[in-house]
Image (tube, rainbow, N blue to C red):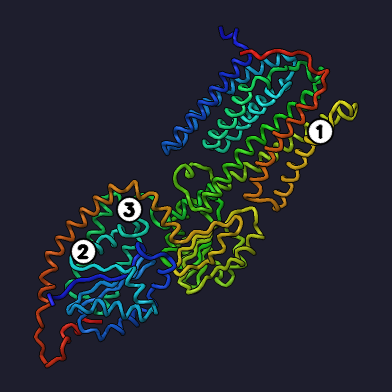
């Protein structure tokens, strides 16, 4: 019976577990208790396993990394954020980060599953059998997942900063990690994101230099702009010029810019790469 | 007149904000005692002056002495008498005993159950004794207050948890730095509260502490007890950038850390937060420093508000404590009342005295 489930059904199940993590955390917070890191992590792990199956089936069907439409890009971005969380979250033992990661991925996956038009056109073999291009796309979207987690951490930083400046330390503010820990996570995530995006652009540029007509100007400008902004933010942070709240707001803006740039990336695909049109399975 | 009255008159944190209490800090207890020396009806007097309160406990034998204490205090402090009238606490009789019991037990403190007040009450009593202004009533009341305070602290949970200034400050630092193992702490001031806070930091893992005081020998003594280093007080501004946490508790009348000095220090370490805890009254740190990026400034009132969050969970303990203290106040009152009655009987005098001189003998 499980073998009969479609990729979207697996992904719906995964979204269900992500929502369960969100629900668990919300109930804990409403009750004024510390969020249960173990339960949330279990929910996220279950969702992650199911999402891997769903994306695996989808990848097998499309003949590569499933990044052929907006639905797949959102799913892959959520997957990337979870992958990073499983490393960062364990490192910093931040249960509240787990809760907010659940929020992010639940939102991304439910949104992508709820809009059928995003998955109405499914492109297959979009990388033309070129593994470098596939790696370029996967790294780029993975870095966007990192920026997603960075945005969450920045949100937590701003909340912690507000609580300290406003001298409101009770309630669920008491569950937030220390402001210095959050700052360190932000810097490491931004560094990781910039490194991944740099690699993605390097791989992409090798392909692009051979045939500049294959990449639209909008996509090129958008992705380079996101990379430049992220690299500049990291540089200014290292120089001590972009700190504290301004740094956190910049990180949030970076994720917003990354999401907006997906429009340009998705819209710049060549018509000939659309090889199949299917109604999404329900 | 119905007879001598046990009274307390003063102002506390309940009705006066920090800015007002700064103006209420008694400039010179000896000057006040000198002013009150001529008050004929004032039979006994003890003065309790802390960050949270200024209170005058006494026995008024002519019904006017309490008002004269208030008037003398306002005149000495250049404090508007009408304003004091609005904010003042005034109790008489058995309620005075209950109030002192609650004060000594920490029940009336901003930081519920804090321990510092016990020592401060003891000190106030010792000073009054040394000045010769305690008699049968105040002696018994203060001694019973110490017993009652020890009892409730031992037999209830009123002193458990983080409601002391020191522990709230340490919790606050953990919210900023996480582990305190790498945090560098500067203690500005060598008073009891600063030293207590330093010990709390040390017990929570802070290894790098330094003490700066206006009296270098005292700073060295405190530092030695803490296993800490010392910083010359005059170098506090230039060395500020070396520290993550600064605890100020000097008795200086003006700010010892300016916002501009903190801003200069932050330019040397912009990425690392600075926690400044100002436990002094009058305040040691210019309040505008709170607006600086990455600077977190907390004063006594702020810490009290944080501690207040724990108060709700302890309502049950407060009720228990109050019941115990009320019982003890009733017991005390039954013993004290005869003294007040006897105090109303004019004492025989070996020589002719001017009217009211009976009270003058014990007056300050």
Q: Where is residue A132 in the image (x, y as percent from the top left)?
A: 81, 24
Q: Quadrant of the C terminus of chain A?
A: top right
Measure how far apart labels 1 and 2 are at the Cα level.
80 Å
Mark 3 or mark 2: which is in front?
Answer: 2
Do discs 1 and 3 belong to a common subunit?
no
Q: What element carries label 2?
A: helix
Q: Earlier along the polypeptide chain: callout 3 or callout 2?
A: 2
SS at mark 1?
Answer: helix
Q: Mark 2 points at which residue?
A: B95
Task: Depth check: give the residue in front, B329 or A151.
Answer: A151
Relative to B358, say whether A277 is above or below: above
Residue A112 figure quarter: top right
Question: Dot 3 falls on which chain?
Answer: B
Q: Do the residues labelled 1 and 3 touch (CB within 8 Å)?
A: no
Q: Say few, some or many: other residues with alpha carbon within 10 Å of mark 1 (under 14 / 14 to 19 / 20 or more).
A: some
Q: Could you tell me how far apart the alpha carbons at marks 3 and 2 are, in whole angstroms?
A: 23 Å
For the point 60% across and 40% down, which residue is it?
A: A153
Left or right relative to A62: residue B44: left
Q: Which mark is residue B159?
A: 3
For image coordinates 38% across by 77% down, the residue present is B79
Chain containing the residue with disc 1: A
- In-front residue for pair A126/B260: A126
């Amino acid at each position: 019976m499980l073998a009969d489930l479609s990729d979207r059904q697996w992904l719906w199940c995964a979204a269900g577990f992500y929502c369960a993590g969100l629900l668990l955390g919300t109930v804990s917070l409403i009750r004024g208790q510390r969020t249960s890191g173990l339960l949330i992590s279990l929910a996220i792990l279950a969702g992650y396993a199911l999402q891997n199956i769903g994306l695996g089936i989808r990848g097998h069907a499309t003949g590569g990394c499933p990044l052929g439409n907006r639905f797949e890009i959102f799913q892959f971005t959520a997957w990337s954020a979870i992958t990073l969380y499983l490393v960062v979250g364990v490192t910093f033992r931040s249960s509240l980060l787990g809760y907010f990661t659940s929020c992010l991925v639940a939102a991304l996956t439910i949104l992508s599953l709820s809009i059928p038009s995003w998955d109405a056109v499914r492109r297959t073999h979009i990388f033309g059998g070129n593994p470098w291009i596939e790696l370029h796309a996967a790294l780029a979207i993975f870095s966007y997942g990192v920026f997603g987690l960075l945005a969450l951490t920045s949100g937590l930083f701003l909340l912690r900063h507000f609580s300290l400046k406003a001298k409101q330390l009770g309630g669920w503010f008491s569950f937030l990690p220390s402001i210095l820990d959050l700052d360190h996570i932000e810097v490491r995530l931004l560094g990781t994101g910039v490194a991944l995006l740099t690699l993605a652009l390097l791989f992409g540029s090798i392909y692009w230099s051979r045939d500049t007509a294959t990449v639209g100007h909008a996509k090129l400008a958008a992705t380079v702009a996101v990379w430049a902004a992220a690299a500049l933010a990291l540089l200014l942070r290292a120089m001590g010029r972009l700190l504290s709240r301004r740094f956190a707001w910049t990180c949030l803006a970076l994720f917003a810019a990354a999401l907006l740039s997906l429009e340009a990336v998705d819209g710049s695909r060549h018509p000939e790469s659309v090889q199949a049109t299917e109604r999404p399975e329900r | 007149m119905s007879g001598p009255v046990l009274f307390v008159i003063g102002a506390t944190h309940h009705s006066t904000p920090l800015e007002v209490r700064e103006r209420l800090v008694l400039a010179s207890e000896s000057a006040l005692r000198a002013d009150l020396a001529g008050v004929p009806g004032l039979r006994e007097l003890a003065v309790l002056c802390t960050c949270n309160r200024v209170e005058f406990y006494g026995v008024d034998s002519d019904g006017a002495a309490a008002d004269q204490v208030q008037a003398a205090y306002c005149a000495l402090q250049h404090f508007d008498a009408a304003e004091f009238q609005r904010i003042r606490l005034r109790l008489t009789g058995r309620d005075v005993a209950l109030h002192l019991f609650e004060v000594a037990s920490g029940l009336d403190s901003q930081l519920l159950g804090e321990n510092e007040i016990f020592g401060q009450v003891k000190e106030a009593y010792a000073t009054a004794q040394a000045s010769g202004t305690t008699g049968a009533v105040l002696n018994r009341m203060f001694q019973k207050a110490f017993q009652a305070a020890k009892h409730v602290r031992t037999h209830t949970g009123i002193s458990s948890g983080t409601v002391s200034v020191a522990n709230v400050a340490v919790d606050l630092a953990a919210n900023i730095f996480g582990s305190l193992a790498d945090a560098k702490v500067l203690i500005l001031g060598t008073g009891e509260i600063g030293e207590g806070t330093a010990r709390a930091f040390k017990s929570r893992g802070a290894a790098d502490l330094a003490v700066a005081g206006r009296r270098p020998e005292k700073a060295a003594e405190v530092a030695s007890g803490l296993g800490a280093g010392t910083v010359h007080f005059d170098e506090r501004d230039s060395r500020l950038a070396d520290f993550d946490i600064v605890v100020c508790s000097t008795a200086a009348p003006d700010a010892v850390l300016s916002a501009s000095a903190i801003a200069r220090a932050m330019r040397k370490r912009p990425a690392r937060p600075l926690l400044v805890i100002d436990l002094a009254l009058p305040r040691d740190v210019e309040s505008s420093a709170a607006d600086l990026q990455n600077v977190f400034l907390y004063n006594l009132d702020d810490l009290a508000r944080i501690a207040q969050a724990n108060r709700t969970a302890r309502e049950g303990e407060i009720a228990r404590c109050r019941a115990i203290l009320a019982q003890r106040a009733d017991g005390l009152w039954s013993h004290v009342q005869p003294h007040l009655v006897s105090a109303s009987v004019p004492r025989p005098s070996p020589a002719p005295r001017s009217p009211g001189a009976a009270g003058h003998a014990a007056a300050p």
